[in-house]
Image (tube, grey):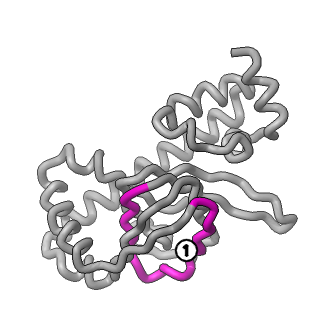
């Protein structure tokens, strides 16, 4: 799973807020790229960068050997994205893609210079650790939902996780996320 750090969560903590101020200084100096709805972003192109996703909606997905696509998560705006999964400073190549579901703007920041410019390494580790545990919690909850709940219950859980962007998501992506087919999801939604 791509590491996503939501800036709205970070701003609730004053120490982390100092880091976001520094981050916005980087944004002013960074390349910004606009992506139209339907664009597929190959994260390998940005593997040495930190990305700030400022506007839009993205779908993270992967493709298996048979060509089937599996939705991993949806990313709303105001989030940092690390194209290489980061866990306690160990980097792995990303095999994930991002689909632009709503016209989007991303800022591309040189990750190395960003982290080198920050003197307070404790703060960085706190953010990385928080992000790591949030992602682990999200992954574990999703596994429990997929294993233990009916399609209707999975959809209800999905609604609570993504209520603010549900209207922008294609049925096929939602179905993929909750582990079913679009036709099965359509039938399940009729019971609501």
Closer to the camera in the image, 145 or 60: 60
Residue 96 appearing in the image: no
Q: Is residue 190 magenta?
A: no
Give percent across and percent down for residue 46: 48, 79
Give percent across and percent down for residue 173: 68, 47
Q: Which quadrant of the structure image shows residue 93?
A: bottom right
Query: Is residue 159 positioned above or below 99 on the image?
Result: above
- Direction right: furthest residue: 66
- Quarter the N terminus occupies: bottom right
Which residue is located at x 55 percent, y 64 percent?
A: 36
Question: Mark 1 — residue?
Answer: 43
Image side of residue 96 versus residue 131, left or right: right
Q: Which quadrant of the structure image shows residue 187?
A: top right
Image side of residue 82 versus residue 127, left or right: right
Residues packed near mark 1 inside 10 Å, few (<14), some (14 to 19) or many (20 plus) = many
Closer to the camera in the image, 162 or 33: 33
Is label 1 in a helix, a strand or a loop? helix
Which residue is located at x 54 percent, y 82 percent?
A: 45
Closer to the camera in the image, 92 or 88: 92
Magenta residues, as a range?
37-55
Query: Is residue 49 positioned above or below 160 on the image?
Result: below
- Quarter the C terminus occupies: top right
Closer to the camera in the image, 164 or 37: 37
Total count of labels: 1
Give percent across and percent down for residue 144: 63, 35
Which residue is located at x 65 percent, y 29 percent?
A: 155
Residue 144 appearing in the image: yes
- Direction top: furthest residue: 191
Which residue is located at x 71 percent, y 40 percent?
A: 171
Give percent across and percent down for residue 34: 46, 69
């Amino acid at each position: 799973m791509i590491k996503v750090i939501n800036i709205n969560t970070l701003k609730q903590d004053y120490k982390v807020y100092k880091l976001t101020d520094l981050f916005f200084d980087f944004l002013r100096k960074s390349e910004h790229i606009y992506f139209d709805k339907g664009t597929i972003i190959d994260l390998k192109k940005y593997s040495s960068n930190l990305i700030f996703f400022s506007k839009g909606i993205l779908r993270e997905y992967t493709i298996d050997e048979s060509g089937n696509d599996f939705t991993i998560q949806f990313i709303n705006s105001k989030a940092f994205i690390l194209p290489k999964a980061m866990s306690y400073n160990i980097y792995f190549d990303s095999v994930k893609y991002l689909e632009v579901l709503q016209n989007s703007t991303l800022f591309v920041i040189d990750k190395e210079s960003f982290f080198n410019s920050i003197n307070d390494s404790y703060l960085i580790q706190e953010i990385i650790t928080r992000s790591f545990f949030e992602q682990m919690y999200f992954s574990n909850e999703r596994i429990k939902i997929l294993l233990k709940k009916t399609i209707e219950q999975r959809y209800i859980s999905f609604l609570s996780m993504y209520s603010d962007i549900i209207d922008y998501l294609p049925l096929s992506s939602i179905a993929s996320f909750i582990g079913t087919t679009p036709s099965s999801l359509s039938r399940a939604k009729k019971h609501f």
